[in-house]
Amino acid sequence: MRAAVYKGEQVLQVEDIPDPVPGPSQVVMRVKYSAICGTDVHAFMYDLAQPGAVMGHEYTGTIVDVGADITRWKTGDRVVGGGGHPPPGTGSATRTNPRFNYRTMGFQQNARPRGYAEYVLLEEWEPTPVPDDVTDEQAALCEPCAVTVHAVRLSDLKLGDAAVVLGAGPIGLLCMQTARAGGATSVIVSEPAPGRADAARRLGADAVLNPLDGDLDAQVVELTGGTGPQVVFECAAAPSTLEQALDLSARGGQVVMIAIAWEPTPIIPPNWMAREVRMQSSFGTQPEDWRIALELMRTGRVSVDHMLNATNFVQLEGIQGAFEALCHPTNELQVVVEF
């Protein structure tokens, strides 16, 4: 099968590698779409992935082979490549350091090939079924949507609250919708890139502000009746956005960190300490987040269609150029590898 193999030093090379063969309790999935995640871009950008790794964890496809002991799945089932409940003894304490989310450093491991390959080997418990009313293209964004579901569920967001989303990349565009589904009455988005800002408007943001144009703090405070938002979702991970999130929050409000900053992020505490702002980090997902994400897509409360026009899809052979472009994104919303 063809796969994009990381060679080190920001090089992905499409090679032929052996097809997977399922064990008794495993299935083989034929990948149809595999979205490129910012975490993988960071692994590429900072040379964190191990040479020989086949990355990719936002993918969907069809089961094409099952092990002898499999009763839950059959060939032809549409699934996403994650979201299942691990059985006892295979959870966080045994998969990596027990102090961390079990997926925290998974992209660095030179383990079995994942979504940037034509076929993926999965344990029986790993996949999640795709509802009939969710297309394959939409299902490819189940995992990033689940990341934002997880963040909103971790937050203190309450019905009627105002929320601010910093950054309108793929995670930010999904977060503004899951925050709305979670009860936010007003959702304000901060985004300097015109294409991404326009996408936020089309997806229903109450206001979209350019942080480079005027006083963002003053504009947000005015739009929230003089108090600031109850929750700020940090989805940008730019050098200044964590402190910006803390400064924007209402007194007693909360900042939820979703995007990962891989470089030093300076913050000056007095302004947000004086308002007793709380910070909540969010990483990865829990199994229920995937099912909630698919249900939000199925019922139309989360739309990914604006992120999935024809220009967002690349063939596997174009993955190197796609990663290079995403290292310094401008208007890109989402890039999806199509097999």
Image (tube, rainbow, N blue to C red):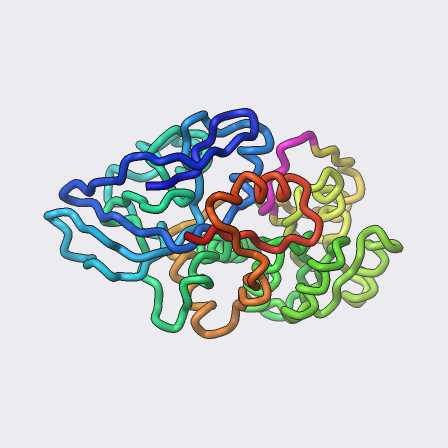
Name the spot of residue 302 as percent of width and height, x first: 52, 67
In this rendering, position of residue 150 left or right of residue 211 = left
Residue 256 within the segment the image draws in magenta: no
Residue at 24% across / 54% down in the picture? 64
- Residue 158 in view in this figure: no
The answer to whether 175 appears left or right of 244 in the picture is: left
Q: Which residues are magenta?
A: 257-264
Q: Nearer the viewer, residue 207 or 183?
A: 207
The residue sitting at 56% across, 44% down in the picture is 38
Drawn side of residue 190 relative to residue 157, left or right: right
Secondary structure predominantly adopted by residues drawn in magenta: loop
Which quadrant of the figure contains the N terminus? top left
Q: In x, y percent, where is residue 88?
A: 24, 42
Whole-percent x and y of residue 52? 41, 27
Measured as percent of width and height from the top left, residue 95 is found at 33, 33
130 over 18 or under it: above or below: below
Question: Would you identify the image quadrant in which residue 137 lies?
Answer: bottom left
The picture quadrant where one finds residue 190 is: bottom right
- Give whichever of 221, 72 is nearer the camera: 72
The extreme right residue here reads 214
Above or below — where is 21 with respect to 129? above
Q: Is residue 259 magenta?
A: yes
